[in-house]
Image (cartoon, rainbow, N blue to C red):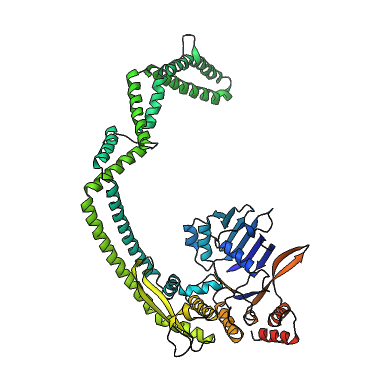
Amino acid sequence: MLKHLHITNYALINRLDIDFSQGFSVITGETGAGKSIILGALNLLSGQRADTRAVQDGSGKCIIEAVFDVAKYDLLHLFADLDIEYADECIMRREISPSGKSRAFVNDSPVQLNVMREVASRLFDIHSQHQNLLISDSAFMLDFVDAVAGNGDIKCEYRNRYEAYVNAIREYETLIKAAKSNDDVDYLRYQLAQLAGAKLRDGEQEALEEEQNVLTHAEEIKTDLYTISRIFDNDDGGLLTELKKIVNTAASLQNLYQQIEPIHSRLENSYLELKDIAYDVSGMADDMTYDHDRLQAVNERLDLIYSLQQKFRVHTVSDLIDKAKDFEDRLAMIENYDDQKAQLSARIDATRSEAIRAANDLSASRVAVFSSINASIIAVLHSLGMPSACVELATRPKAELMPDGLDEITMLFTANKNRSMQDVTGVASGGELARLMLAIKSVTCRLKVLPTIIFDEIDTGVSGEIAAKMGDMMKQMGERMQVISITHLPQIAAKGAVQYKVYKHDNDGQTTTNIKLLSSGERVEELAMMLSGNKITDAAINNAKELLKDE
């Protein structure tokens, strides 16, 4: 559930902090007070694109931050998949600079907008008036029916079969396309022969370049090695001779001064180590020779590698080896084209059959719940003042397999007796669509733990007793989840366990939007204003009290 919302420097909001409650809450306020601004801020947390015009003060950045209690949402695996640290309190934050640069964070981890969108979809759902039209969207209806049917496993099985079918088609098309672009077999063979003839080995370029460097500077290296060797040991004594004297002196001193013993041990170890180093350096100096033939061979090999890299526009021997493998695969594909084509064609047929079987299972599962869905929605509509309303889900097969199956689901509807049912969007009014969508949301929330749902004036087109019944429905939903309704109807506002008011405030020539939690007395006054307008009458006050008393 949404626990806290913080907004800084967004549209008409300087700074806003508000705590939200469980259950059913309502937000009211005069038209233009800024209710849509708060929704806009929440939409930014759902990953929508930022508009720099929304940043109020050009000298500072806009910050939207919300705290959610996610302990009941079983999101641990989602956060792990998205590589975000999980906590039972999830903090989502969006920052927008005056230049338009936007940054998104989830639990203080910077994330891409698609990640923020994925998380937000599991935390809150903003339902605005235009979303009532989703009833005519087959994809929306499919998701709704699948949720009711509990089709998670069946849908997963179908999608696996569908992906196998799509992959088979993709491989077949790749084969056909590649065969068309690889008509010049002789050219491919020539390219492969060049690379195969080079007998390239991964890592040899680095080894050759190192050897080239040594051979090129062989005399210089040999001279320096002999210089080191002479310093260690020469006819005039050298480092080792002098160090040996020091070791012997320290050994003699032990009889008189026992504290020298550890120093003597270290000196002796150093002498032995330096003696080994001197031996190794001397051997390296003796072995170092300038080999003109070998240098020439290394140069020629590197020249070949460099020329092949330039020709094939790559940077490493590993890339050249990959090129050779690609040419081999392309030649094998052309030479075995007929066999591969037949195999892939057979695979397409087989995977299509399996996908169709899985799609039919999914379709059967969907149709099996149509009658119960119809009955549930009709019952809700009757309770919302539509006693003659009737709905019927219908499906027709799609021409081809799609990611969601073979079904296209539509809702047929009539609000009156003895009238034939037609596609819902062609016959339902705005108020009827609002009640239909509320019915769908109500049915869905009975089946699973939904995120916070925010209704943005879903009550448009209704009033009076119907509005009160819609309020009752949202209040019932609030027993299972957090429901927040932005409303202009007092009948709905009175149903909320708590009520917030959005209002404008003029200060020093600047208009700002604020929100506050209303006390019991303030609720009465606000409801009375909603009932009678700015001039509050005693009758409106009494009516407001009666509305609240009923709750």
Q: Quadrant of the C terminus?
A: bottom right
Any part of residue 448 in sight:
no
Q: Residue at x 29, y 42 (%)?
A: 327
Say which quarter of the image contains residue 57: bottom right
In this rendered view, identify the residue nearer to me: 124 or 310. Answer: 310
Q: Is residue 550 left or right of residue 203?
A: right
In this rendered view, identify the residue nearer to me: 355 or 292. Answer: 355
Q: Is residue 189 left or right of residue 75?
A: left
Could you say where residue 147 lies in the image, as x and y percent from the top left?
A: 44, 73
Could you say where residue 471 lies in the image, as x and y percent from the top left?
A: 59, 81
Residue at the limit of the structure toward the top, as seen here? 236
Say which quarter of the image contains residue 295: top left
Residue at the limit of the structure toward the right, as seen here? 508
In this rendered view, identify the residue nearer to me: 70 or 127. Answer: 127
In this rendered view, identify the residue nearer to me: 26 or 330. Answer: 330
The tally of labels here is 0
Residue at the limit of the structure toward the front, as seen here? 426
Q: Residue at x 35, y 61 (%)?
A: 163
Any part of residue 347 in sight:
yes
Q: Is residue 362 left or right of residue 190?
A: right
Could you say where residue 475 lies in the image, as x and y percent from the top left?
A: 58, 79
Q: Quadrant of the N terminus?
A: bottom right
Q: Is residue 518 above or below residue 225?
A: below
Q: Is residue 220 above or below residue 21?
A: above
Could you say where residue 66 lies in the image, as x and y percent from the top left?
A: 61, 63
Q: Is residue 325 above or below residue 36?
A: above
Say which quarter of the image contains residue 521: bottom right
Residue at the limit of the structure toward the bottom, as seen here? 418
